[in-house]
Structure formats: C-alpha cells, structure tokens
Amino acid sequence: MIDQNLLDAVKSYSENMTRPITFVLGTGTHTKRAELVDFLTKIAGTTDKINFDAAATDDSLPSAISFKVVSHIEGASADTGIVFSGIPGGHEFTSLILAILQAGGHTLKLDEGIQKLVKRFNKPLQFQTYVSLSCHSCPEVVQALNQFALLNDGISNEMIDGALFQEQVEANKIQGVPAVFLNGKPFANGLIDTAKLIGKLQEQFPDLLSDVEDDAEQLEQQDVTIIGAGPAGVAAAIYTARKGLKVTMVADRIGGQVKDTQDIENLISVPLTNGTDLSTNFVKHLAEYNITLKEHVSVKDIGETEEENYRIQLNTGETFETRSIILATGAQWRKLGVPGEEENIGKGVAFCAHCDGPFFKGKDISVIGGGNSGVEAALDLAGIVNHVTVLEFADDLKADQVLINKAKEKTNIEFITGVATQEIKATDGKVSSIVYQDRSTGENHERDLSGVFVQIGLVPNTGFIKGFVDLNRFGEIEIDERCRTDRKGIFACGDVTTVPFKQINIAMGEGSKAALSAFEYLVMQ
C-alpha cells in the first residue's frame, strides 16, 4: 500500500517535528483493519517521533478502521481532534502527513489572522468530511478543518473515505465530494476554501466569536493591495513587487480556478502542465519577492480614507490602508438557475467531473455545456460512467475541434444541441432525470439519469465590489485599455473584467499590465 519512497519522505519530514505524536486505533473488526495496522506501523517505523501500538485502542472512535492523532506536549497527551476513518492514501496521504507534522509542532499553514479568529470560536464544532482518495480537491478541505481542530479544543474533524463507508454515503445521499457535515447535519459540498468555510460558520452562528480584545498587529499602509491570486493576481503581485512597492496580496487560495484545472496544453512555452503544478510554481515565484501574503482570507469591505486612499477590512477583523488596489478575483462556476439544481448539489448535481465522476460508475449522466470545459468533462467521465449525454444550448458545439473529434470517437458520448435545460428532478433525495426543451420546436423531453455535471462557463466574483466600481450587465468590472476602473487608484485584471477571452495567458498579461498602470499612477501622485 505504501512504498519506500513515501516512507523515506515521512522520515525526512519528521525532522521538522518538535514533539512526538501517537496514532490510536479504534476497536472492532473490519476487512481493512490489518491493512490499516500495517500502514500505520510502517509510518511509525520511520521515526521515534511517531508512536503506534495496535494493542492500545480507543472504543470511542467511530470504527475499527478509524484512528486519531494524539500530540504529546511536555510529557502530557493531548487529543488533537483529528480522526481518519479509512486508510488515507492517494491524495489524502498529504493530509495525514500535514496532520502529523502540525500536531508535532510544525508551523500551521493558516494566516495568523485566521488562526486568532479560529481560536475565538466558542461553540463545539464536530466536522465529518467525506472524501474520495482520487479527489484532488478534498485534501484542501480536510487540511483546513484539521488545522481548525489543532487550534481550538472545541473543534474536531473526521476524514471519512466514502469508498469504505458506503452505508453512510447512501444514508446521507452523498453523490459528490468533499461532503462536509457539521454536528451531524450537511454543512458544505464540493471544494470550499478556508475563507468561505469561515464565512459559512459566521453566517450559521452569528455569536460564534468569544468577546476578547483583538491584539493583532496592523499592517502599515501599503502601496498596492492585490485581491485575488489566480494567474492575473500573481502576475500583478510579481510586477509590482519588482518595482519596489509595498505589496500585499489577499486571496482565498493561490491559483484560484487554475488550481482545479487538469491538463493545461496552451500555456505558451509549456506544452503540458496541470493546475496543481502551475499553482505550486506561482507560490515559488511569489516567494522570491517581498510580498505580504494574506492567504485563506477574504475582503469583507473596501472604503475610502480622508487622504483619498482606501481602507481594506478582512474577514479576520483586520484592517489596513492602501494607496491603490488591483482587483483580480477571477470567476466561479456559473449555475443553470433551474428548478432542482441548487437543492441537489452533492446529490447528483456536480461541477467537477474528476472529483465526483467515481460516484456515477456504470450510470447514465449528462453534461450541460458544449464548450471546452463541457467536452473535457464528457471525455473524463466517459471512461467511468455508462453513458454521457452532452446538452448544448447553441446549435453548434463551442469546444475546440480537437476536443470534439476526441469525444466523437467515444461510443458512449452523445451530443444534443439547440436545447435548454428546464428542470432537474430527484427521487428519494437523488437526481433521477433531467428535463430539457428543444429550442426549435418548443417541445420538452425528459431523460432518466443519475447525475448532471454543469459546465456552462464562469461568473465573475464581484459581489463584494458591487456598487463600488462600475460593472457591466454580466457583472464584469468595466476597465479601459490600461486596466483602470472608474475609480481613481483602483485597477482590475483577468477573468473578473470585461476583457474578452478568459484564458491563462491573457490573464497573466492583463495582470502585468494592471501592475504597470498602478505603478504609473503611484509615481504620478
């Protein structure tokens, strides 16, 4: 299950631990228990900082293949609140390694402001995060919630491998991951970053925070604040930092939508990469410059100061002033807006073919959208499901011809063009059919299926800035040829703007342009 290269990596990483940890196993029997015991034994065997005794068990753990991480601080044992139900291999192996390191005293990855905020949470929060080991988005959620647990004794998080707990998956009607439950009730589904997790918690529990005095150090006035860290935001940050400006970047996560992208074949000079690798390179490049990074954080409000600068308020409660702003908040998946969509997200309605495709093995599904993302999703799903029906609103497919040709070679992909989705129906809490209308005749058709993957493009992330700068009817920020908005000192770039053709190459160029325009503005003041 675990090869020597991974064990060597664990041994190397453990050098960063300042205190030991222990794995404690649940009680009972399970066909996978011996495999889990072997897995944990081999990991513990890499270093004396990780302890494991299969005979030392805890009957309070959920199952025979559950284990918790216990930290030892100055000789005393402390339950971290981190539990893994299943064998955290695949993408979740990273979640386990980080849990080991962080419980062992290694620095947490969360922004200091977020850490102080989580420590103030005053309610018991018991999270359960259902995952697929092949899901590339799940670890981000698991790792965030594990860190919450380490910061606050009232918080716990259990990672649950859905493949090994099918009865729970069926009982909870889960058809998409990550699926997060809080105190036994559905809380979030699909990729949700740390900033949005915090936001949902604050919405659900208005009195979540203990009333303590905030002793956070405030940032000094910045020359440029970049909001967003996709290709446009990263380019803007690097260009402004190279000009010697005081730069702060505020972002949910570095990479933005790119982080969720699979193969990238049109990044000039790089024949093939993927979103994870490109985002990792963004992080490395940003680290080369003196940029203050506020990651996993979101902007709550922007206001003006008497000095004609701007005041930024973060969701952590922190505020600081900045002389200029570059908006690079990108976009998110566009929804259909039809009956049955919102209420069935995670129950048959999905947006990530790679993450949620395995839930529909051998079943009939539909992909809505005949552009590049839709056809790519159909190709990804064709090797898993029984049949894929691609529904396209226009009379012709909008995808690149090379993708269309690949899809038409598949015997289980069907294209229907010139149709409009009317409704997604569910039976017993799961998607059971889709209703679509033939736009030429007005006739409605209903097709039985188990899943609907929505791939109809993106909508700009401008909710927080609405009314502050001019937007067009699509919600995009209006900019001129120099990336200037209608408000002095505020610039915008990338997918969030009116610039056509939402592409990585274009976003990088626009981010560079916005940075140069901001520099020009500042030196002229």
Image (spheres, rainbow, N blue to C red):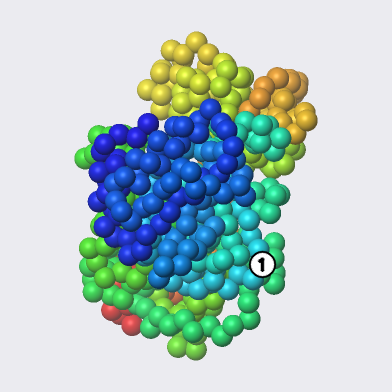
Q: Residue furthest front?
A: 55
Q: Which residue is under mark 1?
A: 123
Tell me the residue at 53%/47% (across/down). Answer: 57
Tell me the residue at 74%/21% (across/down). Answer: 446
Q: Quadrant of the C terminus?
A: bottom left
Tell me the residue at 67%/22% (across/down). Answer: 449
- Quarter residue 493 falls in: bottom left
Amino acid under label 1?
Lys
**x, y percent for residue 207:** 69, 72
Horizontal side of residue 16 vs 59, given as left or right: left
Can see residue 198?
A: yes
Tell me the residue at 41%/57% (across/down). Answer: 21
**Where is 213 relative to 1, above or below?**
below
- Quarter residue 433 falls in: top right
**Where is 270 relative to 442, above or below?**
below
Horizontal side of residue 440 vs 132, given as left or right: right
Q: Secondary structure at mark 1?
A: loop
